């Protein structure tokens, strides 16, 4: 890459290699840059995001769902929400979109080494955590036990099912699923994701919690984790915001005196507590 | 140490004409409808260069346009997307820029380079020469004395002019200003003691001519110390009519948005446009959720960004005391009113 | 407006009725804020708790369509409290006894009951207004868009005359115009029965004047009103129409009737700057020049005539409205030729007495002139009725309550009120082209009171099927205390929610203005 003279707003074309339909709202896209050199030099860490665009439909920040420990393709999971994501859902394998990034502060993977990890996710919020989970599973000896608590609206909404199937087969990993409203054939837990927190007994000194989901869910989960005994430094979340530049200039993602695109999107509860105006705590 | 020279007013036009041979000249001009705006001068004779009024806008639009094309794109069945931008900016001399507006440019220099270097800003900025004009007579809503961005500056300009009736005191600041003096040496005469005295006198008088008493330092201190009572935010936000005029006119407001303008199904341009943090759509996400939901929050961001967050980050506020938001606001939600309220006055 | 906009800032009491001033007239609201900062008191009459109502010292949240009972109650209280301006009534008005007799027959409690506002509040507002030295009434479409719109306006005039709040600076009655040049259009005779400057077509003297000036014979019979034209139905008398800069296919009530009318014309010609919903139905479309591509004048709410100047030549094959009219009339056999818009203005000055002293050279390079401006030496008029009313004496026209044409019932239990939002303008022909404005307001939202919402199981963001006897639309709910229980409110800017499919085309018999502010509707939650 060209270093300081690079035009930060110019994206690079990338081809959709594979599309997985996770549920009727979420698709996962595997992407490779059309320029092979860029594929080779491209590096990222779990928790970072890409600015994804389709010309004429605009650009939006989307967190990376794949793990850098599995090179070859970059994956983003997208929920149909606005004009751009709707257009993405209409695309086929082989088609081209545009990418720039990676941006943002990743999860503190170094300082998580040696610790037990508790992942709490809701809906599409599993996407950035999936990157971390697969990263940890690929470096099992660096991390302790892994627990995933995953909430969905209904049994049909449970996304990332093939991942979950793999994870359930992992010895060092436990997966607990829940749905807000049950449906035919569902044998798992019913209720919001915080209800699963009562079913685990983490060692607080040794465990870090990583949380992602809708803001209301994050808010309740952070409060509950804190009440259970996790320290604020060991509760880590990643936030979704409206962004335009991704590099700390346009200010759409302001939160108090921070910009989520460069100071986040990963924040510990300790960092969030200092802020006066957030919807999260 | 800045060098000082004298430029007789009789020779100003002649000097500007010389500059125009090498630069595009931008200066405050009074248009036929009575508005003074920075505009591109095609002819010194026909333009009415107005150094007596406060320009209604700053030079922000010339460095960071209200709307600019980031790049054009096109694709077809055979060609993949190709994204490219070729800089094409014109060397420009800005003449008659007030101290506040120059300070705003210095702030933009930081904003557009600190986190990442913004190529679009710097391709214009690097081609700019700024000849500033110190303010002998502050305008109705000015308070640059309180933000320490005027009425006279000590650095940041290429050249700073001070009006001494029949002549200008000319100070060189940055290298480009020194070059101009060197290139057009015959226009500049040495300074005599009476000139320095006159400049000092003008400086003293200007300081005593401010019509607004705005306690910026006190407000900054209070904001750093404690939260502002919620009633103040509520009373201000109830009056904000969401027009964005303050941000558009503010010389330091640099928030922007990026949108695609389709020119056909397979081509278009990605455009950057000014935006305002007071708009509710500024933070609303696709799907409708807005993390900044309460009506008071956007007003908070505007004032706290300028007077608290930027002080934390850059050591000084990003309000330059030009007073333009005081004139433009429909509801009186201007920074002077906020500062007064924050300082416990009504 | 009898006053100038700036005068509002100096008033001591401002009575605002049926105006969402902060959203629809922000520059007027700015003067109201200035007045409040100077200590003025604000009274707001509005069924909704608008942003301005939040600033009000007294908010009279009346039931939609109960303006007359409210104003009558205020006037009766003013009489009872001996706050009427007897000298003004004596010197400047007539027919006072009719008003007084009507007011004395009122049962105050009963009248207050109709409005839904406690009598004590009405009394406080009446006394505040009557006691002021300088008081203005600002009103807007919330007053006029009722079947009794004319009577509503006359009742406001009654109130102002009763208290003598008319003839002075900073004191008067100020209708806020809905669009930038509505005033100018009316001034220029875009009314069924008037030549420019409000000279009736059925007065021979005026007709002769215009016949001589234009060298042609003119009809002395008033023409049809807008509603009579756009709602005449498939077999209407009008067979051809030229529509300029107007989008009745979104703005007029009961759109199905409008569509039936326009689609069955022999010829529909539309001239506009964008291909509007109406232009889409046209046989011929003339691309018109925008404000930046033409020269002329606009007249604003305060009767101020200001220049609009051409900045760029018309794009493509666009032409200015004036050029389109001239070219059309030449083709139709009338040789209309003006060298410039300045020449048109000279003719206006010649034929329209209130514009008598207005020439381009006088209104250029300044903020224009306010009519009446009788001749070249006249400085224009900042406020009206200084020594006498235009008609001589101010005529009191007592009015009594008239219920809205369509009241809620078991089938359609809600009252629908319609209006505008800040970031869109009228039918959105222009504003919907802006991505920034669309981001701020991209769709119509139906405001529903929380109590009604709870009963219907509605949450903000839910989709609602909104229907009236005339049509239906699917709209997103927005739960807010801004609307009263039993009422809903939405805007008419968006073709996706063509709310005027639902609105009632009942109209005021005198002004022919439709009752956009009251239609009976039903709400059903749906999953689209």
Image (cartoon, grey):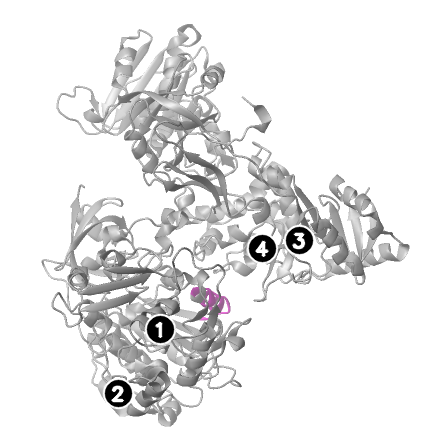
Residue located beneath label 1 in the image: C185
Write down the quadrant of residue B52 in the picture. Answer: bottom right
Which span of residues is magenta-colored?
C29-40
The CA distance from mark 1 to mark 4 is 34 Å
Q: Residue furthest right?
A: B193
Mark 2–mark 3 contact, CB under 8 Å? no
Disc 3 element: helix
The CA distance from mark 2 to mark 3 is 64 Å
Left or right: residue C41 versus residue B163 is: left
Write down the quadrant of residue C136 in the picture. Answer: bottom left
Q: Chain of mark 3?
A: B
| Lower sequence index among marks 2 and 1 | 1
Residue located beneath label 4 in the image: B57
Viewer-nearest of labels 1 and 3?
Answer: 1
Left or right: residue A229 versus residue A174 is: right
Q: Is residue C303 visible?
A: yes
The CA distance from mark 4 to mark 2 is 53 Å
| Lower sequence index among marks 4 and 3 | 4
The verdict on a common chain for dots 4 and 3 is yes
The x, y position of residue B202, in whole percent, is 78, 59
Disc 1 element: helix
Q: Chain of mark 4?
A: B
Q: Chain of mark 2?
A: C
Residue located beneath label 2 in the image: C202
Residue located beneath label 3 in the image: B144
């Amino acid at each position: 890459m060209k270093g300081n003279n690079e035009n930060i707003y110019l994206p690079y074309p990338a081809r959709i290699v594979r599309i997985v339909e996770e549920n009727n709202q979420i698709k996962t896209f595997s992407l490779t840059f059309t320029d092979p050199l860029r594929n080779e030099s491209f590096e990222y860490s779990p928790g970072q995001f890409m600015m994804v665009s389709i010309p004429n439909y605009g650009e939006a920040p989307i967190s990376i769902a794949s793990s850098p420990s599995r090179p070859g393709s970059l994956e983003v999971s997208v929920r149909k929400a606005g004009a751009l994501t709707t257009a993405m859902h209409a695309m086929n394998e082989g088609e081209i979109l545009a990418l720039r990034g990676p941006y943002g502060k990743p999860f503190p993977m170094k300082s998580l080494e040696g610790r037990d990890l508790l992942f709490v996710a809701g809906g599409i919020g599993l996407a950035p955590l999936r990157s971390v989970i697969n990263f940890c599973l690929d470096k099992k000896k660096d991390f302790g036990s892994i627990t995933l608590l995953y909430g969905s609206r209904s049994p049909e909404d449970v996304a990332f099912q093939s991942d979950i199937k793999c994870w359930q087969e992992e010895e060092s990993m436990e997966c607990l699923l829940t749905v807000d409203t049950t449906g035919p054939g569902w044998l798992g837990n019913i209720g919001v994701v915080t209800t699963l927190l009562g079913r685990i007994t983490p060692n607080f000194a040794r465990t870090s919690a990583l949380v992602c989901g809708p803001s209301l869910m994050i808010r309740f989960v952070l409060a509950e984790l804190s009440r259970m005994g996790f320290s604020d430094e060991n509760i880590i979340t990643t936030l979704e915001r409206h962004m335009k530049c991704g590099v700390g200039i346009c200010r759409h993602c302001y939160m108090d005196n921070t910009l989520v695109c460069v100071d986040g999107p990963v924040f510990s509860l300790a960092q969030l507590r200092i802020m006066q105006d957030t919807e999260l705590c | 140490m800045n060098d000082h020279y004298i430029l007789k007013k009789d020779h100003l036009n002649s000097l500007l004409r010389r500059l125009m041979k090498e630069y595009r000249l931008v200066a405050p001009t009074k248009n036929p409808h009575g508005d003074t705006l920075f505009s591109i001068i095609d002819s010194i004779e026909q333009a009415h260069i107005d150094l007596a009024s406060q320009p209604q806008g700053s030079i922000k639009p010339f460095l960071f346009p209200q709307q600019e094309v980031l790049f054009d794109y096109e694709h077809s069945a055979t060609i993949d997307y190709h994204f490219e931008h070729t800089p094409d900016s014109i060397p420009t001399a800005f003449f008659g820029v007030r101290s506040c507006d120059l300070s705003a440019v210095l702030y933009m220099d930081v904003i557009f380079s600190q986190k990442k270097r913004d190529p679009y800003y710097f391709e214009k900025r690097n081609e700019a020469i700024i000849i500033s004009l110190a303010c002998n007579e502050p305008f109705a809503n000015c308070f640059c004395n309180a933000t320490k961005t005027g009425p006279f500056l000590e650095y940041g300009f290429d050249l700073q002019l001070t009006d001494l009736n029949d002549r200008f005191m000319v100070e060189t600041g940055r290298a480009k200003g020194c070059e101009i003096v060197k290139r057009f040496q015959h226009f500049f005469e040495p300074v005599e003691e009476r000139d320095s005295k006159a400049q000092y006198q003008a400086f003293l008088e200007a300081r005593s001519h401010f019509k607004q008493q705005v306690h910026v330092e006190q407000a900054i201190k209070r904001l750093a110390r404690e939260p502002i009572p919620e009633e103040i935010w509520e009373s201000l936000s109830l009056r904000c009519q969401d027009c964005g005029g303050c941000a558009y006119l503010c010389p330091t407001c640099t928030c922007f948005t990026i949108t695609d303008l389709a020119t056909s199904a397979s081509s278009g341009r990605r455009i950057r446009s000014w935006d305002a943090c007071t708009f509710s759509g500024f933070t609303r996400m696709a799907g409708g959720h807005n993390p900044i939901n309460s009506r008071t929050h956007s007003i908070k961001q505007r004032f706290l960004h300028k007077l608290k967050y930027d002080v934390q980050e850059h050591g000084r506020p990003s309000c330059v005391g030009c007073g333009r938001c005081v004139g433009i606001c429909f509801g009186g939600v201007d920074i002077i009113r906020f500062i007064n309220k924050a300082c416990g006055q009504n | 407006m009898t006053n100038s906009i700036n005068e509002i800032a100096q008033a001591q009491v401002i009575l605002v009725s049926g105006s969402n001033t902060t959203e629809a007239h922000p520059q007027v609201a700015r003067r109201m804020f200035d007045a409040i900062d100077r200590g003025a008191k604000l009274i707001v009459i509005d069924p909704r708790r608008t942003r301005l109502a939040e600033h009000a010292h007294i908010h009279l949240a009346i039931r939609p369509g109960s303006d007359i009972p409210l104003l009558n109650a205020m006037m009766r209280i003013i009489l009872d409290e001996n706050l009427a301006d007897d000298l003004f009534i004596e010197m400047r008005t007539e027919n006072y006894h009719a008003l007084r007799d009507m007011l004395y027959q009122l049962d105050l409690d009963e009248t207050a009951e109709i409005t839904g506002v406690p009598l004590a509040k009405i009394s406080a507002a009446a006394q505040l207004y009557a006691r002021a030295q300088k008081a203005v009434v600002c009103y807007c479409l919330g007053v006029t868009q009722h079947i009794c719109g004319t009577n509503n306006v006359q009742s406001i005039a009654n109130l102002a005359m009763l208290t003598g709040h008319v003839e002075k600076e900073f004191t008067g009655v100020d209708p806020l115009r809905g669009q930038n040049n509505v005033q100018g259009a009316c001034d220029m005779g875009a009314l069924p029965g008037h030549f420019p400057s409000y000279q009736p077509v059925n007065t021979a003297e005026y007709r002769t004047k215009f016949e001589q000036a234009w060298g042609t014979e003119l009809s002395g019979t008033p023409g049809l009103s807008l509603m009579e034209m756009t709602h005449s139905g498939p077999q209407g008398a009008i067979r051809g129409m030229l529509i300029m800069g107007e989008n009745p296919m979104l703005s007029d009530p009961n759109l199905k009737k409008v569509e039936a009318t326009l689609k069955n014309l022999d010829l529909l010609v539309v001239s506009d700057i964008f291909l509007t919903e109406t232009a889409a139905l046209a046989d011929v479309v003339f691309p018109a020049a925008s404000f930046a591509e033409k020269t002329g004048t606009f007249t604003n709410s305060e009767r101020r005539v200001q220049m609009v100047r051409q900045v760029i030549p018309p794009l493509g094959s666009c032409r200015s409205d004036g050029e389109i009219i001239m070219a059309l009339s030449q083709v139709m056999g009338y040789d209309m030729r003006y060298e410039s818009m300045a020449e048109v203005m000279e003719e206006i000055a010649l034929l329209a007495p209130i514009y008598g002293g207005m020439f381009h050279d006088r209104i250029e390079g300044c903020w224009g002139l306010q009519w009446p401006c009788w001749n070249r030496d006249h400085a224009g008029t900042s406020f009206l009725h200084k020594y006498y009313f235009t008609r001589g004496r101010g005529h009191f026209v007592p009015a009594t309550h008239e219920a809205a044409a369509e009241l809620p019932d078991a089938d359609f239990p809600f009252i629908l009120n319609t209006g505008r939002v800040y970031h869109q303008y009228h039918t959105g022909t222009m504003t919907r082209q802006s991505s920034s404005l669309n981001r701020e307001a991209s769709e119509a939202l139906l405001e529903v009171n929380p109590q009604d919402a709870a009963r219907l199981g509605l949450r903000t963001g839910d989709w609602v099927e909104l229907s009236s006897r005339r049509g239906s639309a699917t709209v997103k709910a927005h739960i807010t205390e801004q609307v009263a229980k039993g009422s809903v409110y939405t805007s008419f800017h968006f073709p996706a929610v063509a709310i005027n499919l639902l609105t009632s085309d009942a109209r005021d018999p005198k002004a022919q203005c439709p009752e956009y502010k009251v239609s009976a509707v039903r709400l059903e939650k749906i999953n689209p």
